[in-house]
Image (cartoon, rainbow, N blue to C red):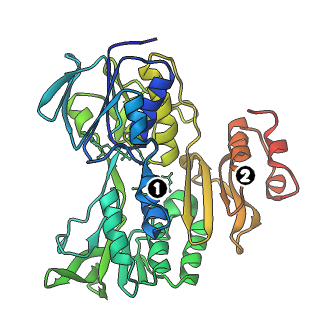
Amino acid sequence: MARSGRIIVVGGGLAAARAVESARGAGYEGELVVIADEPRRPYERPPLSKGYLLGTDASSAVYPLDARWYREHRVEVRTGVSATSVHVDAHTVEAGGEVLGYDRLLLATGSSARRFAGPGAGLRGIHHLRRLPDATALRRALRPGGRRVVLVGGGWIGLEVAAAAREYGNEVTVVARGVPLAGAIGEHLGRSFQAMHEEHGVVFRRPAAVTAVRGESGRVAAAVLGTGEHLPADLVVFGIGATPNTQLAASAGLELREGGIATDAGFATSAPDVFAAGDVAATWNDRLGRHLRVDHWANADSGGRLAGRALAGETVRSGEIPYFFTDQYDLGMEYSGYGELAAGAELVIRGDLAAREYVAFWLADGRVVAGMNVNVWDVNAAVQRLIRSERIVSRDELADPTVPLDALAGDVA
Ligand SMILES: Cc1cc2nc3c(=O)[nH]c(=O)nc-3n(C[C@H](O)[C@H](O)[C@H](O)COP(=O)(O)OP(=O)(O)OC[C@H]3O[C@@H](n4cnc5c(N)ncnc54)[C@H](O)[C@@H]3O)c2cc1C
């Protein structure tokens, strides 16, 4: 195990925090330096579209580790500093005008929000949501209520913002190209999420796209649809996806796959002593037989922890089933599984879809490849065991709430 030397972690998100925490936990005693370009220590983002946006969580809720932890564990965090280049042969990183040598390097540079770049992009009242100040600005804009909010994009973050905007008493229109969330959970269940939002007063315009934003005196006045129609608006929020921050890795000559930095199952990239984890990493996945990039919280959490142990010199192997969650109004949901295996699979519902209290399973060739529990709790671990077991199960047993899920999974851990 590496006990000395210098480990550099580039990134200021959850993956970076978990990596330094677990490198120290694994007994690494050498120098640990975090380079984070935002002006704050590493933080996590799910509260930005939930509790923090709603004003129920303080900003301190976003930090997985407090400032004292870094001091006590001798981790130097350089905030507001961007790593601008990596030289893999020389084992150096350039950051803030300095050249720093490393023995091991972790790239945890995450993703950036895809930004609207069409006509009107510079108007006041246009919002994106990725960083803490984005959420602070959006919260300030939503909090008074009574505003006309156009939300562009029917993904998870867009719908969470729609829920928060309604809870503050704003008028909300979601503009989406298709059924919301269809890419993640299919049209049938996506429609059920749309129905829930409609019950809360959200209006959907789809299929539609916002191609421009019209302003008056430098402020947003309307979102312009591809058809030329104007939707009057005080705020336009773009939730149109995120792109992984691979520039540093690409310019260092690292291999990229699936839009991310290619790593083996032990988080090692194509360059010696350089690792990658979190949103930016495309990690080898045995089940799929290819690299998989996952841009969700749990992947940054577990990937960061495992990569930290790898940095400390341990041999690790990624085997997590992709997992994510959402909270909207009074609905809570957890999803585990492989979206690409679920495409075209048979959907089986256990529970009451109309009451939004159910577990959905995706059954491919008789095996559960994904599962989603909605307002049903303490079942996700069993859903994961069922996926991992790869056992053939019948649709009737799956749909029957009296059949324990653990009985279907057998003795898989
Ligand atoms: C609003 C919002 C809500 C979300 N909600 C959920 C949810 O409910 N459930 C869920 O599963 N997932 C959710 N996610 C996704 C989840 O937050 C991400 O998967 C997670 O943040 C990824 O963590 P990360 O550490 O890999 O990267 P990030 O959190 O993106 O952090 C990367 C950091 O590195 C910095 N950086 C980049 N390049 C450099 C450089 N060259 N030098 C120095 N620093 C650099 C970035 O500025 C950033 O601070 C949400 C995301 C957002 C934005």
Q: Quadrant of the C terminus?
A: top right
Front-lying residue, 261 or 122: 122
The x, y position of residue 45, in whole percent, is 42, 53
Q: Is residue 92 above or below residue 84?
A: above
Report helix, strand or loop for mark 2: loop
| Residue 303 falls left or right of residue 96 | right
Front-lying residue, 361 or 281: 281
Q: Quadrant of residue 367?
A: top right
Report helix, strand or loop for mark 1: helix
Q: What is the spatial separation of the Cα atoms under label 2 and label 1, in whole angstroms?
A: 20 Å
Residue under label 1: 46
Return the residue found at the far left. Answer: 97
Ligand 1 neighbours mark 1 (CB distance < 8 Å): yes
Q: Is residue 170 above or below residue 32?
A: below
Q: Are marks 2 and 1 in contact (CB under 8 Å)?
A: no
Quick one: label 2, few (<14), some, or many (20+) residues within 10 Å? few
Q: Is residue 375 visible?
A: yes
Q: Specify the label residue 378 is tagged with.
A: 2
Q: Is residue 266 visible?
A: no
Residue at the spot 45% in from the left edge and 68% down from the top edge: 55
The x, y position of residue 81, in whole percent, is 21, 40
Residue at the spot 34% in from the left edge and 57% down from the top edge: 132
First reached walking from the N terminus: tag 2 or tag 1: 1
| Residue 350 falls left or right of residue 93 | right
Picture mark count: 2
Quick one: label 1, few (<14), some, or many (20+) residues within 10 Å? some
The x, y position of residue 175, in whole percent, is 39, 76
| Residue 60 falls left or right of residue 231 | right
Q: Is residue 20 above or below residue 279?
A: above
Q: Is residue 213 above or below residue 113?
A: below
Front-lying residue, 120 or 160: 160
Three-letter amino acid code at the position of disc 2: Asp
